[in-house]
Image: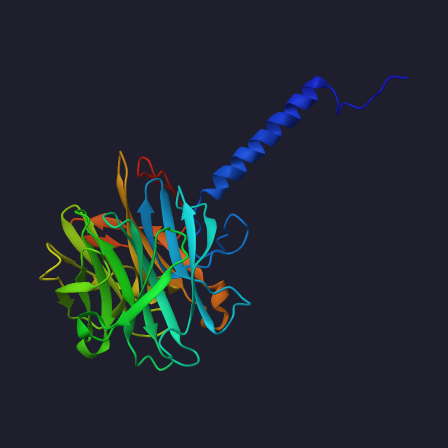
Amino acid sequence: MKDKTNACRPGNKYILLMVAIIVLLTSATAQKKINPGEVWPDDKGNHIQAHGGGIVKIDKYYYWYGEQRRQGLDTGLRYVSCYRSKDLASWQFMGDALQLSDPEHLGSNWVLERPKVYFNRKTKTYVMYFHLDDARYKLARVGVATSNKPEGPFTYRESFRPLEKESRDIGQFIDDDGTAYLVFESWPTKGFFIARLSDDYLKVEKEVCLINAPLEGGAIVHYKGLYYAIGSALTGWNPNPNKYATAKSLEGPWSEFKDIAPPETNTYSSQSTMMLKVEGTKDTTVIFMADQWKPKTQWDSRYLWMPLQTGDGKLWLPEPKPWSIDIKTGKVQF
C-alpha cells in the first residue's frame, strides 16, 4: 500500500527548509532593531540593566556600562553592569564590572549613579567615574575606579569633588581629537560644568566652561563643527522637556536652550544620559540615549534610543519608533 502523505517528498522537504531559512533570517533581522521603550533582552534573554549609563567604543566593540538594577541584589552593595555589542542592538552581558561595598562609610541607602567609563590608550587603563553620594545627597562627589579589562573587575580608587565643586549627575564626552571631559551638574551654581580630565584620566584637571542653566543629565556631542549640549530639568525621577544649546567651542558662548521634542511629551517620558556619534562611510548619525525611569520598579526601567535630527544649529528628537543602524555605513533605517 502506497504512503499517501506528502511530508517526506523531496519537494516538500525543500519547501520546509526554505521556510525555516526565511524564519531564521527574519528573526535575525528583527533582533537588530532597536525598539525604544520596550523590554530590551540581552544574549541571555534578560532585560538589559545599564541605567544612567554610557558607551565607549574599543576596536570593533561598543561597551555599555550602567547601573545594575536587577532584582535580588545584595542591598549593601552597588553594581555597575557591562555589555558589549558590534551593532548597538544585540548586546552580550559581560557581567558586573564593579561590585562595591560602601567605600566612604556613607551609611544605608548610599548612592552610586550614572557610571561612565573612559579608555586611556596611553596607560591601557579603563577609568570609571560615577556619582557617589549618601542617602541625603549631601556628599556630592565623583567616585573613580579602574581596570585593565573593559569587563572589569574594576577596583575602587577614591572619591573627590571635581574642581572642589559639588557634583551629582555626571556625563562623559570625548572630543574628536581624543580629549576626555567630565560633565557634572552642581546645585549651588545652578548649572553644569564641562571639565577636562588629566592625561591619565584619574583627575579632573581644568574647568572648561560652566553652562549657566539649572540642568542635569548633561550630554554633549561635536557634530559638523558645532557642539550640542543637552540637559534635563531638576525634577528628580519625573521626566520633563529636555533642552539643548549650541556653541562653536566648548568654552562657549552657548546659545539659549530650546526644546528637543514637543514639550507636552516630556521628552517622551525620558531623561538624557548621553549622545553617541556613529561615523560611517556614508553618513554620521547622532543617537540620543535616555532612560525611562520606573522608580518603584527600577529593574523594569526602559531605554529610549533614537537617531537625532541634527545640523545647522538645530537638534530634534523624532517620535520614537523601531529603527536600525548599519554601523559600517552609519545609515539609519526605520
Between 326 and 118, which is closer to the camera in this rendering?
A: 118
Residue placed at 13% from the left, 58% from the top? 250
The image quadrant of residue 290 is bottom left
x and y percentages locating residue 7 in the rendered image: 75, 25
x and y percentages locating residue 277 in the rendered image: 27, 47
Residue placed at 25% from the left, 72% from the top? 160
Name the quadrant of the C terminus: top left
Name the quadrant of the N terminus: top right
Relative to 132, is 319 above or below?
Answer: above
Relative to 204, is 55 above or below?
Answer: above
Q: Is residue 36 visible?
A: no
Residue placed at 15% from the left, 51% from the top? 226
Work out which residue is located at the far right of the displayed protein and give it: 1
Q: Is residue 136 visible?
A: yes
The image quadrant of residue 203 is bottom left
The image quadrant of residue 126 is bottom left
x and y percentages locating residue 293 in the rendered image: 42, 66
The reply, left or right, for residue 293 in relation to residue 158 is: right
x and y percentages locating residue 234 in the rendered image: 29, 74
Marks counted in the figure total 0
The reply, left or right, for residue 173 in relation to residue 294 is: left
Q: How is the image coloured?
A: rainbow
Relative to 80, is 63 above or below?
Answer: above
Between 284 and 178, which is closer to the camera in this rendering?
A: 178
